[in-house]
Image (cartoon, helix red, strand yellow):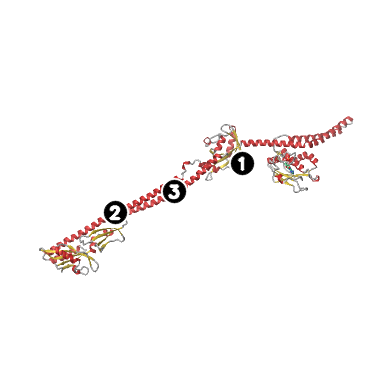
Amino acid sequence: MPSRPHLWYTLAAMDRLPSATHVSASRLRWALALPKLGVVLLLAAVATLLWLLHQNEMDEERAALIKDVLWLEQNMRFHLRNNEEQLQQLAFDLGTQADANAIFRVRAAHLLKNNPDIARIAWLDVRGTLKEALPGASAEVPDADAFGPSSAQKAFDTALRFRTLVYSEPYVTEGSTAHFQVNVPIPASGRNTGMLVATYSFEKLLDSQVPWWFAEKYRVVVADDNDIQYAAKSNIQGTPNLSYQLPFDPPAGGLSFRVYSYQGAGNPLQRLLAGAILVLATGVFWSLWIVRNLMKQRARAEEALRREHALRTAMEDSLTVGMRARDLEGRIIYVNPAFCRMTGYTSEELVGHGPPMPYWIPEQLDETMALHRAVLAGQAPPDGFDITFRRKDGQRFQALIYEAPLIDGDGRHTGWMASVLDVTERRYAEELARQQQEQLQFTSRLVTMGEMASTLAHELNQPLAAIASYNAGCLNLLASGQAAPDDLRKALEKLGVQAQRAGRIIRRVHDFVRKSEPKRAPCLLGEIIEDCIGFVEAEARKRRVQLRTILPELPPLLADRLMLEQVLLNLIRNGMEAMTDTPEGHRALRISARRLDDEVTLSIADNGSGIAPEVKDKLFTAFFTTKPDGMGVGLSICRSIVEFHRGRLWTEDNAQSPTGSGTIFHLTLPLEPA
Ligand code: ADP
């Protein structure tokens, strides 16, 4: 029986798998859904966090913007108020001091120098006529009155009327530069004597008052209610994201500061963090995806393993062949339930056990140990071997063992795998069959003898009659008193020869029917054939059959002579019987032998009836016969005897028969070296 040690070893390893690792499909779905939900929630949380951070940043930016705008507005107001004071002081001095012109020139120059945003300072009389101005009249900074009833004129009039400092509304000159004026009345002895008019350039005001860092962050625009833009300052480009507006007061008149904030680079650390979170979240999602695939693969593998495990358990339980695996030291590493049932020991009792095994026969320990060592040395017979084992309850049984090397998954030889068959019943049946076969052979021989009895009796008659006549002759000689010793000796010698002949016949019959164990010994095929012919020649004569033998020189055969004689006798007698209806001239039986390499083929050819095709298949079956008084066991016994001698027996039609029908029985016998 071919064993599959590798498969069994693998299956044995699977036995150690815990069944709890099996994840059901719904559990797996849940197990996979939870991380997915977790990742979605995580992404939502990260998005919310980023949004909150952005909002926070916007709020902070807005707060910073408002603070900066307030600061700018305050700075601007402070600057303008400061200038107001200086202008008022100058106006007062112009109204009260004698050398007013000189004072104007010095102080106005000083003011202009310190305030680049003041484009011009003019000294007018109450009618608005220019008395003095620094710098002189220019196209760029024209007089206020040059525009007639303009906003500047209105402010001039108001200042004059209310004797107070008044800012004009902004106006745009032809060169499209925007300006505004501050009119400071020059009081002298309780009345107005003139007007000090300072012209501010919006552009320059922003240039001087908006610091560089402010311009780096914001765009500052001065505009009025009608969205007319008078000046702007910024060092950056782009789309503003925040803006804040504050009234520009002074000079008022609907003017306001509009400060636009631009999206800066933001907080790089924060952005880096957000980016990192996004990358990490993607990484987590990706790794979860991989884990999901791995889990699916694992679940599939577990399912396959579970199925295989179930199959293996079913196979193990239903197997009637015992399986036993041993490591290279001979210790048992695995036994299947069938082996446990066979020996009566449990798997726990056997696994880990080394030689001598508990199921070995105590009085055969040495032989079993020698066999065990031979197996470990790789010298176990490939066709298996028989051994007697002892069950736990002491009962003995016959085991047929096939040993094969145990190869693991990496192709390494890790031990020996044996399949063990309890062949007690089989061996008993075989023994019984053998005995029955022997009995049958014996019976068949007796039957043959019975059938040949009359011919043999006739055969015996001849020497007995000769003996009787020689005896009578001798007696007569003695009675006549002329008995010459020589005559007597001759007659007695002949008598002795005939007695020996009769004795040989009797011994042959005796030998043939003697019951004996088969034993093979060197014997010559020629002698066996000669013996057989001696047996049947009387019958052949009676049947008028010619016996011919063609024998080459042959070495001795290792065979049981009696058994071979039985085969030949059977075949010869069958051949003669088949020729009953053959014309007398053609009744010939040819016994020939041919040597081919290391075997001899013996052929017995007759010119008889031949064998019908429908009979051919049944020829060698026991108890098949076509003869009314036949037993039908001859050929089946012949075949088993030939096979016992490791030969073959078969038939073919005798194509060379002169009658057109006939049979040849061939049998081969191996020539074994003596
Ligand atoms: P039995 O001779 O008692 O019938 P065998 O087993 O010797 O038993 O032979 C079985 C049958 O095979 C015979 O009955 C016969 O029909 C057939 N047979 C055997 N030898 C020959 C032969 N040489 N020619 C034709 N038929 C044969």
- Counting from the top left corner in percent of width and height, residue 327 is at 54, 40
Residue 556 screen position, x and y as percent? 72, 41
User: SS of the residue at dot 1?
Assistant: loop
Return the disc, 1 or 2, that comes first in the chain's sequence.
2
Q: Position of residue 176 (x, y in %)?
A: 25, 67
Q: Which mark is residue 351?
A: none
Q: Which residue is mark 3?
A: 292
**Which element carries disc 2, helix, strand or loop?**
helix
Q: Quadrant of the N terminus?
A: top right
Using the image as rendered, state which of residue 649 and residue 298 is in the foreground.
298
Residue at 54% across / 34% down in the picture?
A: 345
Relative side of 448 to 145, left or right: right
Q: Amino acid at mark 2?
A: Asp
Residue 5 visible in the displayed image: yes
Residue type, numbered disc 1: Asp
Q: Relative to 340, is 219 on the left or the right? A: left
Q: How much space separates mark 1 and mark 3, taking CA atoms? A: 52 Å
Q: Which residue position is annotated with label 2?
A: 59
| Residue at the image point whose x is 70% and y is 36% from the top | 440
- Return the mark for residue 383: 1
Q: Which residue type does callout 3 highlight?
A: Arg
